[in-house]
Amino acid sequence: MKTAVVLLPGLNRDRDMIAALTKISGKAPVTAWQTDTEIPDVDLIVIPGGFSYGDYLRCGAIAARTPVLRAVAEKAAKGVMVMGVCNGFQILLEAGLLPGALMRNASLKFVCREVKLSVANANTAFTRNYPPGQVIRCPVAHHDGNYFADPETLKRIEGEGQVVFRYAEGTNPNGSVNDIAGIVNDAGNVLGLMPHPENLIEPAHGGSDGRALFEGVLAAERRAA
Amino acid sequence: MTIKARVTVTLKNGVLDPQGKAIEGALGTLGFGGVNSVRQGKVFDVEIDGSDKDKAEAELKAMCEKLLANTVIENYSVAIV
């Protein structure tokens, strides 16, 4: 099981992500820097969280136009699994690999807390290890996580089961439409989510609710290989 | 020759603007009455080499589509000044 982590100036959750991937896959991920035009053959590419390029212009906007993101898009088009967390989600949206946009939190405040997430679609490679409708705990830390899509796009992604995680039990921290916390693309191989599952994978974290996500996608790829 | 242009990027109608709302509230606090709506946007002043204004305008529109605006949530306009 091979994984890659995309590194960009201003990201700050890359070490957490590398630690989680190493622990769960048993092997340290390779890393790809902003100027890299190719990413080695891996089963899963992860764009971690942070504040790439200082959130200048719009969150993720500059990162989405870097050479390494073109390489990510090429891999995604070939069916390689791609996951973006927090700023990684913003980058995937800005790169056009996922539909919609993330806007300033409705409260205008940075939120750093634990939320509840319900698994809205357990029939994806990323969520297959969760029972449908399961509610898990997960930390969030962001200023721009307010998901928005025009009514037509929203209807389409809801109808196609592309909404995979929703904020549950009244914990929507940012005003996202339909409590959307995470979505997949129509092919199902690209996931973006605001919460940080990599920060809840072992008892020392205070829980391991995020672990099944990584185990699901890594096991899915093992079976296919 | 340098062509100077101003690109204005604004949120589309129907897209919530919590920052605009906060500014609207602050204006009320300062005693400005009758402010019905504030929408926050961005302005880019761009200077481009050349003298062909039509070409520059087309180039600026391409810049908006590719980077300066997120057309999922924003509109843009280009004015050669």
Image: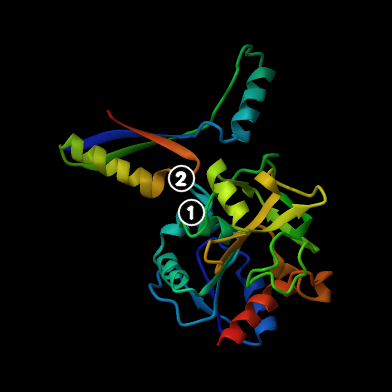
Which amino acid type is marked by label 1?
Answer: Glu
Q: Toward which corner of the image does residue A183 lie, by quadrant?
A: bottom right
- Residue B37 placement (x, y as % from top left): 58, 22
Relative to the observer, which residue lies in front, A131 or A142? Answer: A131
Looking at the rendering, in which quadrant would you find the C terminus of chain A? Answer: bottom right
Residue A94 marker: 1
- Residue A81 placement (x, y as % from top left): 54, 73
Disc 1 is placed on an element classified as helix
Residue A109 marker: none
Residue beneath the point at 41% across and 70% down? A74
The chain holding disc 1 is A
Same chain check for tags 2 and 1: no
Relative to the observer, which residue lies in front, A68 or A123? Answer: A123
**Taking B4 as reference, is A220 left or right?**
right
Which amino acid type is marked by label 2?
Answer: Asn
- Residue under pointer 2: B70
- Residue B72 placement (x, y as % from top left): 48, 44
